Amino acid sequence: MSSAAEQEAVRGGQSALNGERQAPAGVNGHRRSPGTPRAPVWPGAPTPLGARYRVGPDGVAGTNFALWAGGAEAVEVCLFDERGAETRCPLTELTHEIWHGFVPGVQPGQRYGFRVHGRWDPWTGARWNPAKLLLDPYARAVDGAPGNDYGALPAEVYGHVRDWPQQHVADTVRDDRDSAPFVPKGVVVHDDHTEDEWMDDRRPKTPWADSVIYELHVRGFTKLHPGIPEELRGTYAGLAHPAAIDHLVRLGVTAVELLPVHQFAHEDHLLRRDLRNYWGYNSIGYFAPHAGYSASGTAGQQVGEFKRMVRALHAAGIEVILDVVYNHTAEASELGPTLSLRGIDNRGYYRLQSDARRYADYTGCGNTLHVVQPNVLRLITDSLRYWVTEMGVDGFRFDLAAALARSMHDVDMLSPFLAVIAQDPVLRRVKLIAEPWDVGSGGYQVGAFPPLWTEWNDRYRDAVRDFWRGALPDVRDLGYRLSGSSDLYAWGGRRPYASVNFITAHDGFTLRDLVSYERKHNEANGEGNRDGTHDNRSWNCGAEGETDDARIRALRRRQLRNLVTTLLLSTGVPMLVAGDELGRTQGGNNNAYCQDNATSWLDWTMLDDPDWRPLFELTSRLIGLRHTHPVLRRRAFFSGRRQGADGLRDLAWFTPLGAEMTEHDWYAPAATLGLYLSGRDIPGRDARGAKVTDDSFLAVLHAADRPASWVLPGAPWAETYELVVDTSREDQATAPGTVHRGGETVTVPARSVLLLRVRE
C-alpha cells in the first residue's frame, strides 16, 4: 500500500476491528456504546480547570468540570459507579478552547474520566479517539492503574491497533475498543484550601546555605523499617511516623527530596518481565499524589495523607522537596498507550517533529511536553502552585530541566518556562533545583541556569570520585569543586549554594557500590546488562563485589568515610542519598529503576551492624559540624585575597611542605591537597546585623595508598591545631582532641581525611 493510500485508509476510519461491528454514531457522528446513560449538565464555568466540587446556582451542590482540548470537536465527562457502570455527560459549553459544565449532585469521591472527540489523522498529529477514556490532567486524586493483572498493558489502552500486522503503520490505525475498564480514573476531591487547614503548620524555611538535602524514596525508605507499623510501611503515613522522622532528625538533614510522588504508570516492557517502575519517573497525573503510596485509600484519601506527612516533617524542622517530571509523560512515543494528554490534544501537549506523526524526544522517554504552548505552561505552573499552596511542599527538583528550558529547539535561559517561574509570586519563593541537562543536542547546561535556581553539579560528583580513586591528572578541578564551583556559578549574583554537591544519587551506584564494583551488574533488570551508564568512575578496592577479605572490607569502609567527609566539608549544598549513611548496596546495579524489592529498599538492620553504625555516626557528626560552623556553609564565594595586617586569606591551599600552593603546584600530578578555611572574616551579617566570625579549619585530603608527612602551616595561620576528624579511624570517638603545633610535621595516614580546628 502506498503512503498516500495508507493515509487515506486511516483518515477514512476502520469500519471493523477483528470482526467486531461498529457501534452507532454518537456525538458529532462519533461512535458511542448504545444505551449509555446520560446525566444533566449545566453550563458551569471554564475556570478553574479540572474537577472542582462546589455549591452551584440556586445552592445546588455538584462538580464543575473544565478541560482544555484545543481542536477537539466534542468532550464528554464520564462518571463511574462502584461497579464500573458509566454515565456520560456531554460538555457543550466552549470558552477559549476550554470545554466545561456543572454536573449537579456529583460529590467528592466520584470517579471520572473524559472522552474527547475529533479527527484521527496521525500524519498531521491528530490522534483523537473517543473510545479511549482519558485521565483529567488536573485530577487531584487517581484511582486505579493502567492495565490488569496479566503482566502487560492490554491492547485496549492504546489509541492505535497495537498488533496491526503492518508494523510500519501500526500507530496510524485507530483502535475502537473501549479502554475504560483498563485505565485509571480521576477522583473528585473536596480540595478547596482553607487557612485553618495549615494554621498549625510552620514551614522551616531553611536558608539555602544551611540546607542538607536527603534524597529518598517514600516506599523504599519505609518498607522495611521495624519501627513503623507494617500496615504503614511503604506509604506517606509511614514516612510521617515518628520512627522514620527520628532517623532524619538524628542524622541532621534539613530537607527530604522525594523521588517522584506524582501519579505515575508502569511501562509495558516492565510489566511483561514482571517488574515495575520503582523510581516513578513516568508521570501521568501532575496534581495527584501517587495512589500506590497511600495507606488510607485511593478515593481521595491519599490527598489528606500526603498533607499530614508534610505537616509531620515540618514539625520536625524538615522541608519537603519534590522531584518532578514535567519534561515527558507515561504515554511515551507514538507507539505508547493513550492515557491522557495524547487523546486530549496531541498536537497541543507534545512537541512533534516536522513529520507530525513522530514526537520530538529530548528526554529519552519517547516524548517531550510542548512547554512553550501557553496551556501546557499553565498546566505545569498550576501544578507547581498547587503543591506549594495546598499540599504544603517547600520546593522542587526538576528532572531534565534543560528540556523545560527549550524554546523552539535550543535551550534558552530566557525561555517562557524560566521567565514565568522568575516572576511568579509563589514559585519564585520556594527552592528550585535543576537537573541541568537533557539528552538533546546542546542539552548539557551545568552552570547556565539563572539566579533563583540551584543545580545538580555533576562536575563535583566526577571530580570527587576521580580524586579518591586516583584518576585525577592534577587538582585544579578538585579545588574549584571543594570551594563552591565559582568557575560555574560566580556570575549574575549567584552564590555557592547554587551548587548542589553530590557524589551519588538515585541514578547510579550507591556509595558502598561505588567502592565495591568497577562494572555495572544490571542483569536483574532483564535488559542484558545494556541499561545504565558505563561511566561509573568507581574503584572496587581490589575485588569485584562482596568479599570476605577483611583488608578490602576495611579499605572500603575507609573510602566511604573519605567520600562522606569530603562532601560535607565542601562549600555548597550537600545532598545525601537515603541509605548511604548505612552502607546500603544494590549489588552493583547502577540503574535500579525497576527493582521494587530488597535491592532498593533500605535495610535498617545495618544501623545496628558494628561495621556500618560508625558511618552513620560520622555522617551525623559532620552534618552537626556544618550546622555549628558558618565557615563550612558560606553564603558568598571565597575571594582568596590576603586580608588584615597578617595577610591571611579567607581560603588558602597548601602543599605537604606547609607552603601555599603555587601555579605550578596546581598543574602537577598530586594525590594530596590541603585547604585552610578562615573563619575570621566571613562575608555577610547575622540576623541582628552583627559580623559573622567562626573558627578556622585546615582540611587535608590524601588519596595516595601510602602515608604522607605533612607540615602544618605555622604563624600567622595557626599556633596550634586540634584534630576533629580522622577518617583512617573506624571509631571517631578516639580521634578528636589531639593537639598539634603549627609548623609540626604530622603523618597523614594512607587514603584519609584529616580535619583540624585552629586553636586561638
Image (spheres, helix red, strand yellow):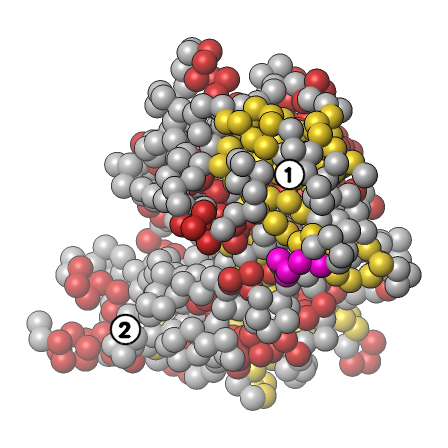
Q: What percent of the width, then of the height, locates residue 311?
A: 79, 49
Look at the picture and state if 495 lies above or below 594. below
The answer, for residue 200, to whether it is visible in the render is yes
Q: What percent of the width, then of the height, locates residue 187?
A: 63, 58
Look at the picture and state if 282 lies above or below 58. above
Q: Is residue 348 left or right of residue 741?
A: left
Q: Is residue 641 magenta-colored?
A: yes
Q: Observer-nearest residue: 315 or 582?
A: 582
Q: What percent of the width, then of the height, locates residue 684?
A: 78, 62
Q: CA distance from mark 1 to mark 2?
A: 67 Å
Going from N to C along the chain, the mark reached first, 1 or 2, is 2
Asked where in the image residue 47 lies, by quadrant, the reply is: bottom right
| Residue that badge 2 annotates | 357
Q: Is residue 309 left or right of residue 288?
A: right
> Mark 2 packing: few (<14 Cα in 10 Å), some, or many (20+)?
some
State the quadrant of the N terminus: bottom left
Q: What segment is highlighted magenta in the picture?
A: 639-643
Q: What percent of the width, then of the height, locates residue 93?
A: 58, 85
**Picture residue at 44% right of the left edge, 36% below the top:** 671
Kindly identify which numbered label has been placed on residue 129.
none
**Picture residue at 58% right of the left edge, 88% below the top:** 95
Q: Is residue 18 magenta-colored?
A: no
**Picture residue at 73% right of the left edge, 52% below the top:** 646
**Picture residue at 67% right of the left edge, 76% below the top:** 424
Most prominent secondary structure in the magenta stretch?
loop
| Residue that badge 1 annotates | 713
Asked where in the image residue 498 lies, by quadrant, the reply is: bottom right
Looking at the rendered structure, the secondary structure element under dot 2 is loop
- Amino acid type shown at disc 1: Pro
Q: Observer-nearest residue: 698 or 21?
A: 698
